[in-house]
Amino acid sequence: MKVAAVQFTSTGDTNGNLERATELIRRAAGEGARLIVLPEATAQSFDSGRLDTQASDFDGPFATGLREVAEELEVTVIAGMFRPADAVERDGKTINRVSNTALITGPGIHRGYDKIHTYDAFDYKESDTVRPGTDLVTFDLDGVTVGVATCYDVRFPEQFRDLARAGAQVIAVPFSWADGPGKREQWRLLSAARALDSTSYIVAAGQSRPGGEAAAGEASGPTGLGHSVVVGPTGARLEEAGYEDEILYADLDMAEVEKARKALPIL
């Protein structure tokens, strides 16, 4: 199965992000990709203001726009978006939280995975504005079972093992990983480790680095450091991007998953 990991920088303009995502999906589909993974926060970047003001559900313009192009091209698309969730009280204020959702859309499918592990770390608390999800998600594409995780989930190996035990041979990971000292090295280690933990392919698509390579290594907040990657089931990086906009392609052979799981029966 040919896959694509699409790396670009979204903005605060949801309509503009939909147009850009559509353009990149068409490009990837034109290269024969059947599964096309876009970054976390494709619909609206994290640094662009309140997420609840543009959040919309699966019947909203962003999700339906991606569904239309995916169905037209007969591909499956995974892309980060935000959906209305609940209201909570924080320090005397009512906050309308959203779900950090990886939309899964294409012929015969239109659903999502809600990020389970919110980024409550390093003096930041994503759960203040994002309701954590609760359910693992897998789906079938061309006879291959695909699982979905998002960004900070990659620090939790049990989620990836559970996805593999649920049948996942490929795990798609939209992400928007903060840059800063050591952050690239952490991402590269964790993405490879989760492939090895689960003996699955990892197809991870991230936000490219604002400012490109010239800003590499500087603290960026949750706005991306690039380095989208496709990792094989034994932890080998098959394709890896740099800091700039890029589309990665890889042909995934499920026989390699079977071979890895026979040799390493860790599940």
Image: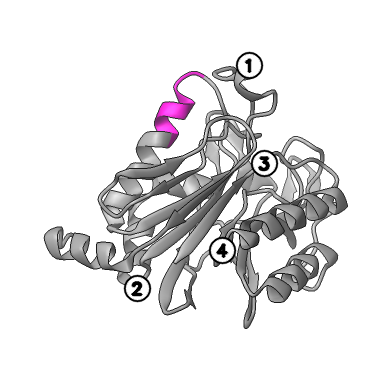
- Taking 7 as reference, is 23 left or right? right
Crowd rating for badge 4 (residues with CA inside 10 Å; few <14, some 14–19, many 20+): some
Q: Position of residue 83 (x, y in %)?
A: 73, 61
Mark 2 highlights which residue? 167
User: In the rendered view, would you say 84 is above or below 178?
Assistant: below
Q: Position of residue 119 (x, y in %)?
A: 55, 42
Q: Earlier in the sequence, mark 4 or mark 2?
A: 4
Mark 4 highlights which residue? 32
**122, 161: nearer the viewer:** 161
**255, 204: nearer the viewer:** 255
Quarter holding the C terminus is: bottom left
Q: Main secondary structure of the magenta part?
A: helix
Residue 46 figure quarter = top right
Residue 263 figure quarter = bottom left
User: In the rendered view, would you say 249 is above or below 61?
Assistant: above
**Amino acid at the residue labelled 2:** Gly
**Amino acid at the residue labelled 3:** Phe
Please tell me the numbered disc located at residue 8. Answer: 3
Mark 1 highlights which residue? 214
Say which of marks 2 and 1 sits in front: 1
User: In the rendered view, would you say 154 is above or below 223?
Assistant: below
Quarter holding the N terminus is: bottom left
**Amino acid at the residue labelled 1:** Ala
Please name the residue shown 45% across and 68% down the image: 146
Say which of marks 1 and 4 sits in front: 4
Whether residues under marks 2 and 1 lie with C-beta atoms below 8 angstroms apart, the answer is: no
**Segment tinted magenta in the rendering:** 181-187
Q: Position of residue 260 (x, y in %)?
A: 20, 59
- Taking 166 as reference, is 182 left or right? right
Q: Can residue 68 be seen?
A: yes
